[in-house]
Amino acid sequence: MKNLTLENIAKACGGIYVGGEEMKDREVQGIVTDSRKAEPGFLFVPIKGARVDAHDFIDSVMANGALCTLTEKDIGKKSFPYIKVHSSLQAVKDIAEFYLKQLDIPVVGITGSVGKTSTKEMIAAVLEQKYKVLKTKGNFNNELGVPLTVFGLRPEHEIAVLEMGISDFGEMHRLAKIARPDTCVITNIGLCHLEFLKSRDGILKAKTEIFDYLEPDGHVVLNGDDDKLITVKEVNGIAPVFFGVMNHQGIWADEIRSMGLKGISCRIHAGNESFQVLVPIPGRHMVYNALAGTAVGLIYGMNLEGIKKGIESLQSLSGRFHIIETGKKTIVDDCYNANPVSMKASLDVLQDALGRKVAILGDMGELGKDEVEMHREVGVYAAARDIDKIICVGELAGDMAEAARLAAPAKDIVHFAKKETLLEALPGIIQDGDTILVKASHFMEFEKVVECLEKL
């Protein structure tokens, strides 16, 4: 890894190097926090967890050939080199910041209340038509995940697409300090993390901390249909590029037509040019993702033909509107996370499915003091959709079910207090030919519902 010698690592994180002088100019080959993933030549970063302290694995990791380890503890004289630090978590952020500075590649930073991951996937799919891209994998979007993603960069990469997620003030500032984005993309200002950020204005303030370390010649890409983001007129003298459906400045779309579960068709306009494209994942929100991808593609010198090809190459991820055809039924696995906006968007798409339409909806987390009212709001919305059966699961989902029944007394609506009870009942509920939407916040572990449905 470029310039990541043990000496430079110690300086970058303010640590104290302990070991032979002959080792100080050795470069590490990789950096991991999981002892099981440590390989010869790697740096091991032990993190103290709630249940496990990875410092307990230092000796075994080093015996298996790792080059060096960090440690917050005094471990005395060892046969291997180590770097004593005050905080392993802070050290890993400092090292990532130093490493990224050694690489002459642009960084696209993506945040927002809803759609960060799908927008990241879209932007990466577009840029991959011209560049070798490293993108955030899974949910590695926090103060540990972003550094670990950065450590995946190698000389062959030409651009990094980093998802940046937060739940409180100050977090985005710290992430931006690591990433130093050349391009900042914000998808929207929604209702996530109200428990900590209190209001949409609070969310706007926290999300726009991404601008704190924007490069002076950078770019800002914002959703122009969002009433909060449209108020951002400039960032350090940089005029934002807006995208939207209602707002026709910047990059915009019209001729939007649902193609059912095959995706959504639209025409994207950029200046005096436009192109027709089929986004291969359903949902009106995917049009916004395609617009963001178009804006970023143009920033990095792509033509519309390449951008269109990238959009149409997009593939869904497990847990994020991933469509599973079992031969007997269609499962829409959208269980990675949920909030009122994404719930409504997914319900809208389910309406376009063939056969009997079933929605399995679970609790939504981190909604703050209005969580009951927001669950009731989703219940009323679900009841008004062309959906045959609504199954609500969880404590808060009880309010969702009650509101849905009041709004549509004749509709087939059931409530299960616990996921385990639902799993027992599913064989008697689901029929061949059904299309089933599975959606809840991540803590509900609805991937188990998906697994159960796949076996029916």
Image: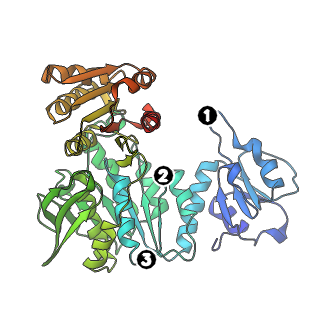
Residue 223, quarter of the rendered image? bottom left
Say which quadrant the N terminus sits in.
bottom right
Q: Nearer the viewer, mark 1 or mark 2?
A: 2
Q: Of callouts 1 and 3, which one flags the residue occurring earlier in the amino acid sequence? A: 1
Crowding around mark 1 (Cα neighbors within 10 Å: few <14, some 14 to 19, many 20+) is few
Instruction: Between residue 189 and residue 333, name the one nearer to us.
Output: 333
Is 436 drawn above or below residue 320 in the view shown? Answer: above
The residue that appears at 69% across and 62% down in the rendered structure is 10
Q: Amino acid at mark 3?
A: Tyr
In the displayed structure image, the side of residue 345 where residue 150 appears, left or right: right
Are dots 3 and 2 in contact, CB under 8 Å? Answer: no
In the displayed structure image, the side of residue 445 where residue 338 appears, left or right: left
Q: Which mark is residue 89?
A: none
Is 101 drawn above or below residue 175 in the view shown? Answer: below
Secondary structure beneath label 1? loop
Instruction: Between residue 50 and residue 286, name the one nearer to us.
Output: 286
Q: Amino acid at mark 1?
A: Ala
Residue topped by disc 1: 50
Crowding around mark 3 (Cα neighbors within 10 Å: few <14, some 14 to 19, many 20+) is some
The percent position of residue 295, horizontal first and vertical second, equals: 26, 69
Q: Amino acid at mark 2?
A: Gly
Q: Which mark is residue 138?
A: 2
Secondary structure beneath label 3? loop
Crowding around mark 2 (Cα neighbors within 10 Å: few <14, some 14 to 19, many 20+) is few
Residue topped by disc 3: 131
Is 166 drawn above or below residue 417 in the view shown? Answer: below
